[in-house]
Amino acid sequence: MLQHHVRPEGLPPVNGYSHAVVFSGRTVAVSGQVPLDEEGSVVGEGDPEAQIRQVFENLRRALAAAGADLGDIVKLTVYLTDLQDLDCFRRVRDQYIPTDRPPACSLVQVVGLVNPAFRVEVDALASY
């Protein structure tokens, strides 16, 4: 069961996320995914869109391994090293995540990630 409360009364407008999501069922926690391919090589060094796409592909694969998919995500935590990448992140996210039932989301700007070439990291909580 999933209930998306995109914009409850009295809360500010949103851009691609829900203020609250109620869920029950099997829960999957996905560790922070970074822009590494299956060989462990950095994808899109200096290219935020390529990095964000790789992160969502990694999320998709991790969820599939657990029997879930991107539509089952109830919460994302996004770490960006440059807020100039936010519009690109939103555009790519909306190609992977159903826009009619977006997950709850937190966004954090960070000084750096574990590898200086990484511009983005995303972890997720899913329920199915």
Image: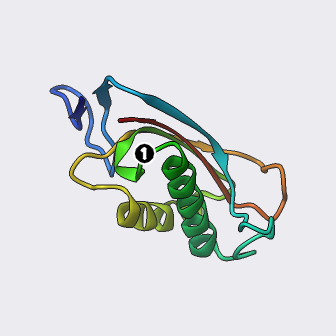
Is 113 displayed left or right of 44 in the figure? right
Q: Secondary structure at mark 1?
A: loop
> Residue 32: which quarter of the image?
top right
- In the rendered view, would you say 107 is above or below 99? above
Label 1 crowd (10 A; few <14 / some 14-19 / many >=20): some
Return the residue nearer the eye: 108 or 100.
100
Residue indicated by mark 1: 68
Give coordinates of residue 25: x percent, y percent: 35, 25
What residue lies at 78% left-to-right and 50% top-to-bottom? 113
Return the residue nearer the eye: 94 or 112.
94
Give coordinates of residue 72: x percent, y percent: 36, 43
Is 58 displayed left or right of 117 in the figure? left
What residue lies at 34% left-to-right and 49% top-to-bottom? 71
Give coordinates of residue 120: x percent, y percent: 65, 56
Farthest-out residue, left: 9
Quarter holding the C terminus? top left
Give coordinates of residue 34: x percent, y percent: 69, 56
Farthest-out residue, right: 115
Quarter holding the N terminus? top left
What residue lies at 51% left-to-right and 42% top-to-bottom? 66
- In the rendered view, would you say 26 is above or below 71? above
> Residue 95: which quarter of the image?
bottom left
Return the residue nearer the eye: 43 or 12.
43
Q: Amino acid at mark 1?
A: Ala
How many badges with numbers are in the image? 1
Return the residue nearer the eye: 79 or 33.
33
Is 101 displayed left or right of 83 in the figure? left
Image colouring: rainbow
